[in-house]
């Protein structure tokens, strides 16, 4: 049995190059937002996001829609607002903000602009390591 394990170990070592891969895990935070259908003259919608109200650090733009999904760099609490831009390139004031926390246990308070869902997706990153004999 010991010889079989040694041969198996040698066979596996022969298949592997001089380095092996180690993995690390990070999370991807995804949120889907929905709002009322925009007026007919709207041609661009901006979703603003930030960890503090009215301090928007992230923006996502989209065409004339009433729903958008955004990928956020971290979990915790986030605040969101939207603006409409019309065909004359005039941007509206910010909507009321909504908040979402990725660690909350209940649904958010219903509003005309509300979080539809949130999810966490694990991303595995591989880094090089030297194989020891």
Image (tube, grey):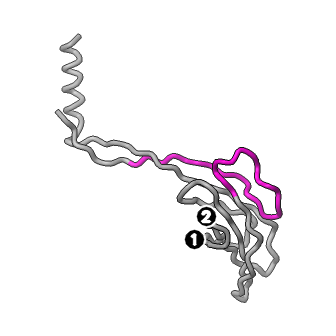
Span highlighted in magenta in the image? 100-125
* Residues marked 2 and 1 touching at CB (< 8 Å): yes
Q: Quadrant of residue 35?
A: bottom right
Q: Is 131 left, or right, of 42 in this rendering?
A: left
Q: Quadrant of residue 116?
A: bottom right
Q: CA distance from mark 2 to mark 1?
A: 8 Å
Between 67 and 53, the one lying in front of the other is 53
Badge 2 density bin: few <14, some 14–19, many ≥20, Cα 10 Å: some
Which numbered disc flags the more N-terminal residue, 2 or 1?
2
Q: Is 111 left, or right, of 21 in this rendering?
A: right
Q: Residue furthest bottom?
A: 88
Residue beneath the point at 71% across and 81% down = 85
Please name the residue that numbered disc 2 is placed on.
51
Residue beneath the point at 62% across and 72% down = 55
Can you say which quadrant of the picture contains the N terminus? Answer: top left
- Judge whether 8 appears above or below 18 on screen: above
Between 131 and 41, the one lying in front of the other is 131
Query: Where does the image place residue 72, in percent across and percent down from the top left?
Result: 57, 59
Please name the residue that numbered disc 1 is placed on.
57
Between 130 and 78, the one lying in front of the other is 78
Residue beneath the point at 80% across and 55% down = 109
- Judge whether 11 appears above or below 113 on screen: above
Tag 2 secondary structure = loop
Badge 1 density bin: few <14, some 14–19, many ≥20, Cα 10 Å: few
Query: Where does the image place residue 120, in percent across and percent down from the top left?
Result: 58, 48
């Amino acid at each position: 049995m010991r010889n079989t394990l040694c041969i198996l170990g040698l066979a596996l070592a022969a298949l592997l190059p001089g380095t092996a891969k180690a993995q690390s895990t990070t999370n991807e935070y995804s949120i889907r937002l929905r709002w009322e259908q925009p007026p007919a003259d709207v041609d661009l919608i901006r979703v603003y996001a930030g960890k503090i109200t009215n301090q928007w650090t992230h923006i996502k733009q989209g065409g004339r829609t009433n729903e958008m999904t955004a990928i956020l760099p971290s979990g915790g609490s986030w605040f969101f607002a939207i603006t409409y831009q019309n065909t004359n390139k005039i941007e509206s004031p910010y909507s009321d903000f909504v908040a979402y926390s990725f660690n909350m246990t209940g649904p958010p308070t219903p509003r005309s602009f509300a979080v539809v869902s949130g999810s966490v997706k694990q991303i595995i990153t591989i880094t090089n390591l030297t194989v020891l004999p």
